[in-house]
Image: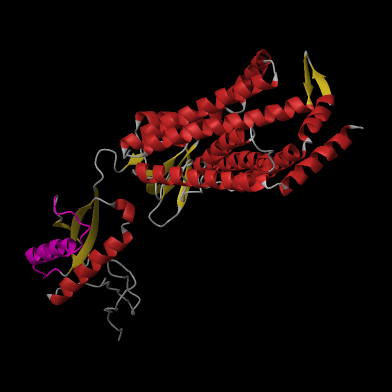
């Protein structure tokens, strides 16, 4: 009798065990495990106040996080250990592999969702993890897993002084994936704790620490996984030298961006939330990554600025020392207007907006004698430039226009005089400009 016959006999005995009355005992025990896991997770959620928070362990609901299948697996294993002494097992032979696969899938999905919340490639990886976990579960339940592993061991090749097999490569890939998920889990927990109550300058510094810790942990995780596969790490010294030469020659700009990003985050010359003007683009810094900085304008446009540009070029930080910004608008009135009244009306119109600061208060002044009227400049301070300035200017200009019209103060139209000679004599000295609103013609008709 060959291996397949033994396998069929084992599967037949296992399927026949489902007809035994002891299956009801196993089902009842499994339901008790589900209830215990539910009660423990619900109690921990209430005690730790995790409702509504994104968490790998707890999720958004009781069964949504990774803690529920982990506890269910632990309780199921305890129940299996106790029942195996008195009754033949049938349900738990399937339940334990299913719960292991569920734990792997839930941890992988939750860690990726938290570590990369807005990445489009997370969903395909989650599906791949699910397929691999369920395939391994089927092979485990049917008893084919040892035979598949044995066949994979027969496929091997030699790389230098190391002999690698297909089984070793698969196990190494799984180990690398597990270590990577663990490092991402730990780094996500550290980042969440660091950024939980950080604001302003602390936010940028803590984000720099979080990014550095994540990169360091992922690096050590990959080293550990390669050691588990059996790859000689001394061979990586040649690769490290080649990478160093590549960075020094072809990747120097890319390396400069990463170094510049670290400098920005550590010295805090620019922080998340600052309003900056760089390369004729003004906006609010919404994110500082390792390679680039995201600047969002008040119009909704986003600019991806390489960090090297933020270091080597002139950057105006409008809110580094003081978030307040001074704005102004210019108004021209007729020469016969009451100057003191105009100044008072301009100041009151600026104060009509709730966004204009009262301290320092807005001010108006006679700034120039224009060609068509008196020019006044009204200046005011705001503390929220990230909310935009066009709407604020519009509100203040409309208030100024209404106030001037209410007090019958004229806003003069541009006027120009055009001289026309009709007798062939030389033109008189003076400007010869087209009239914008009307034409005044002077001259003599020849006799």
Determine if residue 89 is in view: yes
Image check: 230 left or right of 111?
right
- At 13% across and 50% down in the image, what residue appears? 359
Residue 382 in the image, given as x and y percentages of width and height? 23, 52
Residue 69 % position (x, y): 55, 42
Q: Quadrant of residue 9?
A: top right
- At 38% from the left edge and 55% from the top edge, which residue is drawn? 298
Which quarter of the rendering shows the N terminus?
Answer: top right
Q: Quadrant of residue 201?
A: top left
Compared across the picture, whether 113 is left or right of 194 comes to right
Residue 276 shown in magenta: no
Place residue 402 in its image quadrant.
bottom left
Q: Quadrant of the C terminus?
A: bottom left
Q: Is residue 439 above or below residue 85?
A: below
Q: Please check the rendered image and state whether residue 336 is part of the magenta-colored stretch, yes or no.
A: yes
Closer to the camera, 3 or 170?
Answer: 3
User: Magenta residues, as a range?
Assistant: 335-359
* Count of marks overlaid on the render: 0
Q: Nearer the viewer, residue 124 or 424?
A: 124
Above-or-below relation of 159 to 286: above
Could you tell me residue 236's position as x and y percent? 66, 17
Among all residues in the image, which is located at the extreme right? 1
Q: Looking at the image, what colour scheme do you see?
A: secondary structure
Q: Is residue 365 above or below residue 183?
A: below
Can the viewer see residue 54 in this picture? no
- Residue closer to the observer: 123 or 42: 42
Q: Is residue 424 left or right of residue 125?
A: left
Closer to the camera, 143 or 420? 143
């Amino acid at each position: 009798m060959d291996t397949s016959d033994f396998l069929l006999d084992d599967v037949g005995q296992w399927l026949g065990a489902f007809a035994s009355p002891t299956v009801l005992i196993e089902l009842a025990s499994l339901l008790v495990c589900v209830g215990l896991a539910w009660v423990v997770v619900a109690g921990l959620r209430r005690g730790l106040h995790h409702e509504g928070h994104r968490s790998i362990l707890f999720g958004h609901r009781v069964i949504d996080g990774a803690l529920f299948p982990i506890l269910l697996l632990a309780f199921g294993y305890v129940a299996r250990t106790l029942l195996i002494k008195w009754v033949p097992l049938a349900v738990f032979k399937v339940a334990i592999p299913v719960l292991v696969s569920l734990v792997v899938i839930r941890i992988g999905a939750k860690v990726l969702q938290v570590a990369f919340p807005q990445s489009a490639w997370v969903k395909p990886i989650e599906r791949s993890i699910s397929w691999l976990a369920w395939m391994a579960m089927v092979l485990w339940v049917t008893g084919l897993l040892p035979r598949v592993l044995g066949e994979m061991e027969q496929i091997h090749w030699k790389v230098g002084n190391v002999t690698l097999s297909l089984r070793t490569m698969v196990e190494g890939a799984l180990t690398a994936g597990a270590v990577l998920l663990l490092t991402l889990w730990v780094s996500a927990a550290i980042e969440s704790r660091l950024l939980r109550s950080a604001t302003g300058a602390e936010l940028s510094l803590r984000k720099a620490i979080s990014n550095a810790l994540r990169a360091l942990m992922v690096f050590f995780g990959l080293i550990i996984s390669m050691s588990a596969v059996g790859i000689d790490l001394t061979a990586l010294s040649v690769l490290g030298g080649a990478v160093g030469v590549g960075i020094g020659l072809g990747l120097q700009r890319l390396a400069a961006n990463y170094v510049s990003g670290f400098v920005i985050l550590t010295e805090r010359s620019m922080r998340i939330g600052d309003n900056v003007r760089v390369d004729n683009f003004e906006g609010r810094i919404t994110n500082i990554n390792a390679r680039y900085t995201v600047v969002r304008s008040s119009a909704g446009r986003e600019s991806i600025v390489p960090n090297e540009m933020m270091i080597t070029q002139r950057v105006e930080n409008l809110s580094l020392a003081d978030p307040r910004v001074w704005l102004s608008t210019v108004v021209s009135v007729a020469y016969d207007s009451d100057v003191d009244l105009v100044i008072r009306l301009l100041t009151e119109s600026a104060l009509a907006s709730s966004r204009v600061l009262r301290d320092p208060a807005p001010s108006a002044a006679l700034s120039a004698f224009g060609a068509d009227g008196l020019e006044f400049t009204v200046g005011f301070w705001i503390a929220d430039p990230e909310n935009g300035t066009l709407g604020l200017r519009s509100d203040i200009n409309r208030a100024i226009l209404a106030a001037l019209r209410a007090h019958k103060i004229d806003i003069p139209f541009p006027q120009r005089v055009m001289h026309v000679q009709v007798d062939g004599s030389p033109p008189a000295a003076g400007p010869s400009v087209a009239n914008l609103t009307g034409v005044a013609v002077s001259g003599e008709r020849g006799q």
